[in-house]
Structures are given as structure tokens and as C-alpha cells.
Image (cartoon, rainbow, N blue to C red):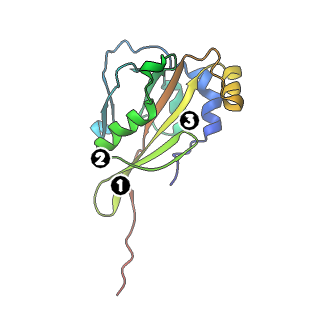
Amino acid sequence: MKLLGLRFAAILTIASGLGCGKPSHNKIERVILGDGLIDIPVIEGSFLTDDCEAAKSFVFTSDVACVAYPFNQTRDSVVDWGSEYLKQLTNSGWVLQFEDNQIFSLVKPMNEDCYYHMNMISWVQASMTQSEAYQMTGSLDGITNGVFLFVNGSEPICETKRRTE
């Protein structure tokens, strides 16, 4: 399945420039994209940001949302943010097709031949040096937030069924 023209390395390269670590002042409590096609609650402890406009040029669509979540959790309050957001999406009818290096590709049936598609991409909100260290060693030194970029595929994908006669 096409990843909407995204490359994980490019996302890590732009991570420091996105600034997706500030809480939104809009007080929106839901991720809503595609005129409601994607509509999930923001999980308590994470927050929508207003700073994802720069990402639009990298994903070839303007239908994106950015949610930041903290890494600085105590052992008693650890949240698996990716699993929680995937659970929200599957509860809304989305099906995980595959996951590759923190890029989650999901589809939602439209009819027998067509489906909607979206990606949920995870990276760290960090400087380039911190991003590279994280990529090489897994070190979270100085990194306080992770970020999910929710990307709505702009058009449904339709497959022509082969007919055997």
C-alpha cells in the first residue's frame, strides 16, 4: 500500500522543525479529519497542537492533525500511546493494514470495492541531534514529547474486481 509519498527518514529530518510540542489553544478535544471520516477523542494526557502546518508539504495533503504525548511518565502511569490511538481508530471502523518503523497504515471500507486510507506516523519532538541519537541508540536524553501525525488519504482507493466467467 502506498504511504502517501512519505518516507520515515524525511519525517525524522523535519521533526525538529515542526515544533509539535505546544498545547493547542483551541481546546479541541477530538482528532477530526476528512469531514468526520476520522473522528477520535484525544486521549487524556496527550494534546492537539497547532504547529503541524509545515508537515502539509511533506504528506501531499492538507488533511493532517498532530497530537503530542509526554515521554516523562512514572512507571505507574505508563501509557502505550500508539496502542491507545490505534484502539480508538479500530473502534471507529479503521483496520490496521501494516506497521513499518512507526508508520501505521489503516483502511476503512467504503463499499465492496473501495476503501478510505490513512496513516498514523510516530516520531519524537526533538532537535536534529536528539533525533539522530534516538534513531541510533534509543536515547531519550532531553526529549520530552513524542508526536503522532494523523494523515487522511485524500481520495478513496477502488479496486476493480476480476470476474471469472
Give the alpha-carbon distance from disc 1 to disc 3, as whole Å: 23 Å
Residue position marked by numbered label 1 in the rendering: 115
Helix, strand or loop under label 2: loop
Q: Position of residue 102 (x, y in %)?
A: 54, 39
Q: Is residue 137 above or below residue 98?
A: above
| Disc on the earlier residue, 1 or 2 | 2
Judge by depth and name the residue closer to the eye, 101 or 117: 101
Q: Is residue 50 visible?
A: no
Q: Which mark is residue 58?
A: 3
- Residue type highlighted by circle 3: Phe
Q: How crowded is mark 1: few (under 14 residues within 10 Å), some or many (20 or more)?
A: some
Report the mark closest to the observer, 1 or 2.
2
Q: In this view, does 113 lie to the left or right of 57?
A: left
Residue position marked by numbered label 2 in the rendering: 93
Residue visible at 40% across and 64% down in the picture: 159
- Residue type highlighted by circle 1: Tyr
Mark 3 and mark 2 in contact (Cβ < 8 Å)? no
| Disc on the earlier residue, 2 or 3 | 3
Q: Is residue 81 visible?
A: yes
Q: Is residue 137 left or right of residue 143?
A: right
Q: Residues within 10 Å of mark 3 (few under 14, many from 20)?
A: some
Q: Where is residue 132 in the image (x, y as percent from the top left)?
A: 70, 27
Report the mark closest to the observer, 1 or 3.
1
| Quadrant in the rendering for residue 87 | top left
Residue visible at 53% across and 41% down in the picture: 103
